[in-house]
Amino acid sequence: MKSSRSLTFALFFALGSAHAATSGRVIVDQIAKPNMDQAAVRTELKLTQAMAFPRDWFDDQSRWSVLAVPADVDLSALRSSRDPEAWVSTYLRDEAAIGLQFVIDTYGDAIEMNVYERGKLQLGASGTMGQVYAPRIEGNRLLGHYVNFGDLFGSALVIDLQFDAEIWQAAKSIPLPADGGPAGAAYLALVKAVHAGDRAAIEAAQPNNRPRIGDEEFKEALPMMQAMMPKKPKITGGKSFGDTAVLSIVGDDNQPASAELRREGDRWIMVRSSAGSSINEQTPLPPVFADTVADLCPTVIKNGIVCGDTTWKDEAFAMRDVLAIQSDDEVHMVLLAPSPLKPQHASALWESEQPLEDLFGKAPARGLLLMFEGASGELSAVSGYHIDPEDGFNEEYLGGEAVRIGDKLYGSFKATKTDPDTGEAKVQKILRFEAAVLDKR
């Protein structure tokens, strides 16, 4: 049973997490794949709280793992867990789970991403899974802005999430004596009972709520238990976490082993054991960020344009309106303009006999026109035009990305500037947009 002190701390952290500023858009259009038992799902996740923890990675360096979930998910068990990665994995396998899990490397790249919604949506992969802008540690929190406009195995997704994640803290422990103390004695007694086939002694070391198995089941399970437990273990110490003890063990042939036991009343019962390896009680070192990308648009997308004050070729633009158009079966246009646009005159973009001024109303015909190939999902940026009231259309390459989900188009425009000495293109400004698609086919 938890002490009142533990409950007080649990309540403190629960209240603190309620103020976490995690918000944004996570929109997924998962296609059906009958051969993989994957259903077609279109959804938007509402994620308002997050937790982060350091996680071991394949190159023996740690990375930050982040879990973002809805407000009604109770994360108190994750806070108190000694193995946050195992807790998150178990949570996400539950059919009721809703969440976004992603891993950030030291440069701010998202190198793993998984989204879940009540067993219907299970989309994820490792690799290049978007960018986390301005990842940083402030106090006991990990902050950043995760953006991903993309396609994953044919399924489209839009992630634009500003997260303020509480950082998981490892439980405090005290060293056990060399023989493991009472927990060590209980473990050695269980090992002796297992190898002797003493059913009564084995059952005495099981939790009270574990159902008693039948005779045939016991006969089948006993050889497996004997194979998993060393015959002559030597306890070399361990750690105590209140009513839980983790023993460090040298097994047969000097192989490392470990066992986790929990106190129930006046007994120590077995929770799990490991032969050939030890249960890792060492928390991975928190990774340090280096050479991350600044957040040039620290606002999540909404209908219209955000961060519209941008530049192109050193020319300042105050973009205030956006028009998304499907003009052909495989062609989308996105027009960004300083003034309100008139959608009913969108055909002026490709019909020369229609005055361009009608599209811009009473304002000068000025803006940027992004061109994309594709009918749905992730669209491919191919070209663009700078529209000038005096010069008309000037073809340019404009850096943009976009995803179409349903009748909406989501994307961004990046204004870059090339260093004449190095030839390196550097992003100067970013704006993002969401717009209903006007079908002019």
Image (spheres, rainbow, N blue to C red):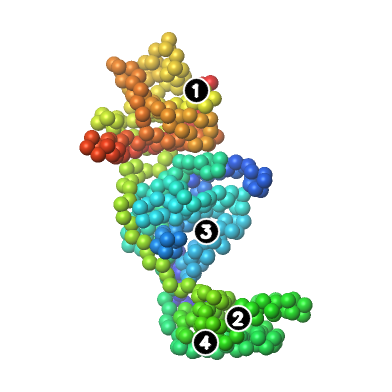
Q: Which mark is residue 327?
A: 1
Mark 1 and mark 2: Cα distance apart in space? 69 Å
| Mark number displayed over residue 266 | none
> Element at badge 4?
strand
Residue 244 drawn at (x, y percent): 51, 79
- At label 2, counting other C-alpha atoms closer than 10 Å, the crowd grade (few under 14, some 14-19, many 20 or more) is many
Tell me the residue at 35%/19% (across/down). Answer: 393
Mark 1 and 4 residues: CB-CB less than 8 Å, in contact? no
Which of the two discs, 4 and 2, labels the residue nearer the N terminus?
A: 2
Give the mark nearest the N terminus, 1 or 3.
3
Query: On the picture, is 156 further left or further right than 414?
Result: right
Mark nearest the camera among 1 and 2 is: 2
Say what secondary structure mark 3 lies in: loop
Name the mark on residue 234.
4
The local secondary structure at tag 2 comes to loop
Q: Which mark's residue is nearer the viewer, 4 or 3? A: 4
Q: How far apart are the two marked residues, 4 and 2, measured between alpha carbons?
A: 12 Å
Task: Give the residue drawn at x 57%, y 56%.
Answer: 97
Asked whether the residues under the numbered discs 4 and 2 touch, taking CB atoms below 8 Å apart as contact, a structural biologist would say no
Any part of residue 410 in sight: yes
* Of callouts 1 and 2, the N-terminal one: 2
Residue lying at the far top of the rendered structure = 353
Secondary element at image label 1: strand
Task: Indicate which label's residue lies in the foreground, 1 or 4.
Answer: 4
Residue that carries the numbered disc 2 in the rendered image:
229
Q: Are marks 1 and 2 in contact (CB under 8 Å)?
A: no
Q: CA distance from mark 2 to mark 3?
A: 38 Å
- Tell me which corner region of the image, top left, top right, bottom left or bottom right, holds residue 301: top left
- Compare marks 2 and 3 and give the one earlier in the sequence: 3
User: Residue 303 versus residue 242: which sits nearer the camera?
Assistant: 242
Q: Which residue is mark 3?
A: 73
Q: What amino acid type should be assigned to the residue bearing mark 2? A: Met
